[in-house]
Amino acid sequence: MHDHKDDSHHKCFAIIPKVGGFLSIIGSILILRDVFLKFKQQKTIQLTTKMMTLITVANLFLGFWENFLSTWMVPRDSLAFMASGNVTTCNLQAFISVLMYMIVETAYTMLP
C-alpha cells in the first residue's frame, strides 16, 4: 500500500500554505504598523482605514491559524503530511477560520 505521507504532492500542499501564511503575516504586521504610526502622530484616521485595519487583523489571524499552522493542527492519525494535532486543535482551527472569514465579509460590506 502506498504511504501518502511520503508523496511529494502532499508535501507541497502542506508546505506551500505555510510560506504564503508567513508572507501574509508579515504584510499584515506592516499594515498595522503604518496605522499605529498614524494613530501615534494623532492624525485623523478615516473610517475606511479603520475598516481596513479590522480586515488586516482578521487576515493576520487567518494567515497564522489557517495557512501557517495548516496541517500541524490536523489530527496525527490522518494521512496529512506534518499532521501533529488532535481533533480539538482541528476544530479550533476551523472555528477561528470561519469566525475571521465572517469578520472580513462583514467589514467588506460596511466599506463605503
Image (spheres, grey):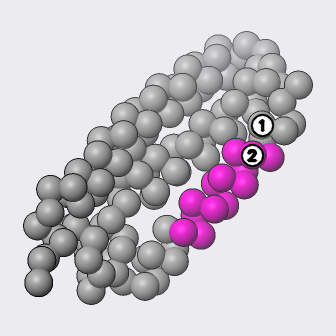
Residue 88 spot, x, y in % from top left:
46, 83
Question: Which quarter of the rendering shows the C terminus?
Answer: top right
Q: Quadrant of residue 82?
A: bottom left
Name the residue at 70% across, 45% down. Answer: 104
Secondary structure type for disc 1: helix
**Residue type at mark 1?**
Tyr
The image quarter containing residue 76 is bottom left
Q: Position of residue 19 (x, y in %)?
A: 30, 41
The residue that disc 2 covers is 105
Please tell me which residue is depicted at 39% across the width and 44% down the height of the picture: 21
Q: Which residue is identified by label 1?
A: 108
Q: At which x and y percent is residue 78?
A: 30, 81
Q: Is residue 85 above or below residue 82?
A: below
Magenta stretch, overall SS: helix
Could you say which quadrant of the image residue 43 lies in? top right
Looking at the image, residue 57 lies above or below residue 45: below
Label count reads: 2
Q: Does 40 sit left or right of 102 as displayed?
A: left
Report the magenta residues as a range: 94-106
Q: Residue furthest front?
A: 1
Q: Are marks 2 and 1 in contact (CB under 8 Å)?
A: yes
Position of the N terminus by quadrant: bottom left
The span from disc 2 to disc 1 (Cα, nearest Å) is 5 Å
